[in-house]
Image: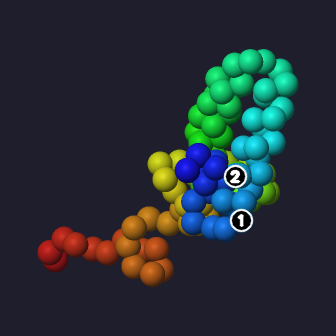
Amino acid sequence: MLMVILGGVGSLAGAVLGAFSFVLLAEWFSTLTRHWQLLMGGFIIVAVALLPRGLVSLPSVLRHGRRGRRNGDAGTGTDEAPGNADGQRRNTEAA
């Protein structure tokens, strides 16, 4: 399950990337210290905090940056006010 979360839920590429990176990091961290699980846990926490859609989203994050992606915003690039399709607010007051 950690491999899927690390790579990205919802795509086969995310699961494969997560499995590959998990095994690669586990091997590398185990050469550094006996407590490699602590390093792996820290890496997963940082990765999930910075890349909530997984490692598979890393290219798009690097390409577009993290601008405008607050509070669960999908980064659609629209900063329009709520209203009709033209972005104009509707008058809800009685005339």
Its colouring scheme is: rainbow
Q: Quadrant of the C terminus?
A: bottom left
Residue 27 lies, with reference to residue 64, above or below; the image says above
Residue at left offset 72%, top offset 60%: 16
Quadrant of the image occupied by residue 82: bottom left
Amino acid type at image mark 2: Gly
Q: Which residue was labeled with disc 1?
A: 13
> Of callouts 1 and 2, which one flags the residue occurring earlier in the amino acid sequence?
1
Residue nearer the viewer, 26 or 95: 26
Q: Which residue was labeled with disc 2?
A: 18
Q: Is residue 28 left or right of residue 15?
A: right
Residue 89 lies, with reference to residue 34, above or below; the image says below
Where is residue 14? Give x, y as percent.
Answer: 68, 60
Tell me whether the residue at label 1 lies in contact with that at label 2, contact meaning CB atoms closer than 8 angstroms.
no
| Label of residue 88 in the image | none
Where is residue 44? Give x, y as percent.
Answer: 63, 37
Where is residue 17? Give x, y as percent.
Answer: 74, 56
Residue nearer the viewer, 20 or 11: 20
Quick one: label 1, few (<14), some, or many (20+) residues within 10 Å?
some
